[in-house]
């Protein structure tokens, strides 16, 4: 006694769908269709490329940042020194700030990886690059000799002062107890404007280096990169994941992934990335398993679009 | 046509369509619209009858 | 260690000999060949006909996606010949980069319309679950391949995309291993690992379609004209009035 299999199931069953077709055939040339397809698509692609081309927005550098927005650069450099920047407080894989990871209840995948790409922002982004200068500032010694409490106090005070200063301009900062911090950040600013900070930070001392982690993180810690992206509608909450610069088509296939970041509650969640990622993965698995899901797999029968596709077949029954 | 060309090559500011949170960039909108149109056309356009054989 | 096998004593072609006696399949290779020929004989792999119900424009989108993939690969090869900076400094390079971008747009366009069609035709019926699954997997892997491509533009977009994408990957715990800011690593994923993965899954998907055949219409019945009137499996055609041509 066999169980009745739904005609919409994926199972082979005894139906016509599960058996090889013994009915009428029509001529069909696989290779010819493939050739026609490749020719047609090639023509479409060449036409689109010739007419529309493709975008190539020039990359920004620490130099372009320091030159066009020195105030923002100094604010960021101060935050890196003081360990208050986004990178400094990111947690794994860059460091181990407690409470920084994205979690769902007890699930903490971010911590599982551990600190695999260790970055000490004050050392790696500020002090070490300055040490490579032919005449390193004397302020370095003052900084390294100080206690961590002193260092935190200086950067906190300087950060507040920069905030209040006109145009965030370091020259307009009120006098105060900032220790060696202004000298360090100013030196870094000069180094950036000259272009040497880009190569020193990027190369990390080696001749060849294809790993841009430090440069990208430092750039991203400032408002400069983020503002440029916002202007181009590339921000996460601007459907940025889907967008391309200009009016070029972007990644429309990421519409659903991008959509979650536009709406509450996801938009303001501190663990938004983890939550949205899990949802999208779950939905993809769901899509894979549609043939197993009763109801969902019967939709094609309920909304009979197939009647249009196979109308000649149904007409001649 | 020239306006469309210019809008894609970047001489013209990027165009966004929509309301509030749901804005869509022009390029993406066109791609999605083309997909829907092609899908509908594929369903309704008649398909040529089979090749006659001698 | 090889064993001595005496040569065949007659001139009959291998295939007759092999199908005649099952005992002839004593090697892994032989057994594999037997399985392959049983599962996908040449007539099924490269047929000259399709069932008469394969008569709708919706059926061209799968082929369109494959054609686009071919253009993606060719344009990618030309870009590879010249290196990642070429398109910034050469107008021909920029043109080839454009063809690579537009062929990707067409690839996803055709693939998604193909997916829509296959859903409304319930193409998983009759034992075609793996065909459906490999299709969805192709979609997912293609998205990953396209994503790594954006990282290799070596321009502002690459900087921004790597900065943003790191968050989702770090949240999932794999960001340190799959480091989107490591251009060297992303390069190898994009031009080697992911194209191989896409090609392999697409090939499997297409072979499964050939093995199972194109799915028959929903509610097709044994009493239908197209099944009752069939006498030859090949070269048989009817016009729209049902008359045999």
Image: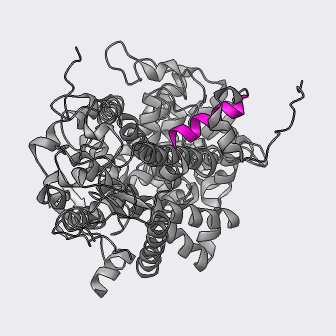
| Rendering quarter of residue A7 | top left
The location of residue A279, given as percent across then percent down, is 29, 31
Can residue C166 be seen here? yes
Q: Nearer the viewer, residue B20 or A159?
A: B20
Q: Position of residue C15 (x, y in %)?
A: 66, 44
Where's the C terminus of chain A, which quadrant?
bottom left
The single residue placed furthest to the left in the displayed view is A302
- Percent across and percent down for residue C84 are 64, 61
Horizontal side of C50 relative to C72 (left or right) equals left
Asked if residue C181 lies in the magenta stretch, the reply is no
Total labels: the figure holds: 0
Q: Quadrant of residue C90?
A: bottom right
Quarter of the image containing the N terminus of chain A?
top left
Which corner quadrant of the image does residue C114 belong to?
bottom left
Between B33 and A131, the residue placed more toward the observer is B33
Residue B48 in the figure: left or right of residue C46: left
**Furthest residue to the front?**
C10
Q: Residue at x 48, y 37 (%)?
A: A79
Side of A236 where C15 appears, left or right? right
At 35% across and 12% down in the image, what residue appears?
A: A106
Inspect the magenta stretch and tell me whether residue C37 lies in it. Answer: yes
Q: Residue at x 24, y 50 (%)?
A: C227
Q: Nearer the viewer, residue B37 or A147?
A: B37
Q: Which residues are magenta?
A: C27-40
Q: Spot the residue most to the bottom.
A: B2
């Amino acid at each position: 006694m066999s169980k009745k299999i739904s005609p919409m199931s994926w199972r082979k069953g005894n139906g016509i769908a599960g058996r090889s077709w013994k009915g009428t055939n029509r001529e069909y040339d696989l290779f010819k269709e493939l050739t026609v397809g490749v020719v047609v698509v090639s023509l479409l692609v060449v036409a689109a490329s010739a007419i529309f081309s493709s975008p190539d927005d020039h990359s920004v550098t620490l130099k372009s940042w320091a030159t066009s927005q020195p105030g923002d650069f100094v604010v960021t450099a101060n935050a890196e020194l003081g360990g208050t920047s986004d990178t400094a407080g990111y947690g794994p894989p860059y460091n181990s700030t407690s409470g920084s990871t994205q979690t769902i209840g007890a699930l903490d995948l971010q911590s599982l990886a551990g600190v695999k790409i260790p970055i000490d922002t004050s050392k790696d982004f500020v002090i070490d690059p300055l040490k490579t200068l032919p005449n390193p500032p004397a302020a370095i010694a003052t900084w390294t000799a100080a206690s961590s409490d002193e260092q935190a106090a200086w950067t906190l005070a300087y950060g507040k002062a920069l905030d209040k200063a006109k145009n965030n301009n370091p020259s307009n900062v009120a006098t105060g107890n900032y220790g060696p911090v202004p000298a360090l950040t100013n030196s870094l600013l000069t180094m950036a404007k000259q272009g040497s900070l880009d190569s020193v930070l990027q190369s990390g001392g080696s001749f060849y280096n294809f790993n841009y982690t430090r440069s990208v993180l430092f750039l991203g810690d400032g408002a400069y990169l983020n503002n440029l992206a916002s202007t181009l509608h590339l921000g996460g909450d601007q459907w940025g994941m889907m967008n391309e610069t200009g009016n070029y088509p972007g990644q429309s296939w990421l519409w659903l992934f991008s959509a979650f970041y536009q709406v509450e509650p996801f938009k303001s969640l501190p663990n938004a990335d983890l939550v949205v990622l899990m949802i999208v993965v779950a939905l993809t698995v769901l899509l894979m398993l549609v043939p197993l899901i009763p109801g969902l797999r019967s939709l094609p029968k309920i909304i009979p679009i197939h009647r249009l596709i196979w109308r000649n077949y149904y007409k001649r029954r | 046509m020239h306006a469309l060309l210019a809008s894609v090559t970047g001489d013209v500011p990027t165009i966004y369509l929509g309301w509030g949170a749901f804005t869509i960039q022009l390029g993406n909108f066109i791609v999605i619209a083309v997909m829907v149109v092609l899908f509908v056309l594929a369903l309704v356009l008649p398909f040529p009858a089979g090749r006659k054989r001698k | 260690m090889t064993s001595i096998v005496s040569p065949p004593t007659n001139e009959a072609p291998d295939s007759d000999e092999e199908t005649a006696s099952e005992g002839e399949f004593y090697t892994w290779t032989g057994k594999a060949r037997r399985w392959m020929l049983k599962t996908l004989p040449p007539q099924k792999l490269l047929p000259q006909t399709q069932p008469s119900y394969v008569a709708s424009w919706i059926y061209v989108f799968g082929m369109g996606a494959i054609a686009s993939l071919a253009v993606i690969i060719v344009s990618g090869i030309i870009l590879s010949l010249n290196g990642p900076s070429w398109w910034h400094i050469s107008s021909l390079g920029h043109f080839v980069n454009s063809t690579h971008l537009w062929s990707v747009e067409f690839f996803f366009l055709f693939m998604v319309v193909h997916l829509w069609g296959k859903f409304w035709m319930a193409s998983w019926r009759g034992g075609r679950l793996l065909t459906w699954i490999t299709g969805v997997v192709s979609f997912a892997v293609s998205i990953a391949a396209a994503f790594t491509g954006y990282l290799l533009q070596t321009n502002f977009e690459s900087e921004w995309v790597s900065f943003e994408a790191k968050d989702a990957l770090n949240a999932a715990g794999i960001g340190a291993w799959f480091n989107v800011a490591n251009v060297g690593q992303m390069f190898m994923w994009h031009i080697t690992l992911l194209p191989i993965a896409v090609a392999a899954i697409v090939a499997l998907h297409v072979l499964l379609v050939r093995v199972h055949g194109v799915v028959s219409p929903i509610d097709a019945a044994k009493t239908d004209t197209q099944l009752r009137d069939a006498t030859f499996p090949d070269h048989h055609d009817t016009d729209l009035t049902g008359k045999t041509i």
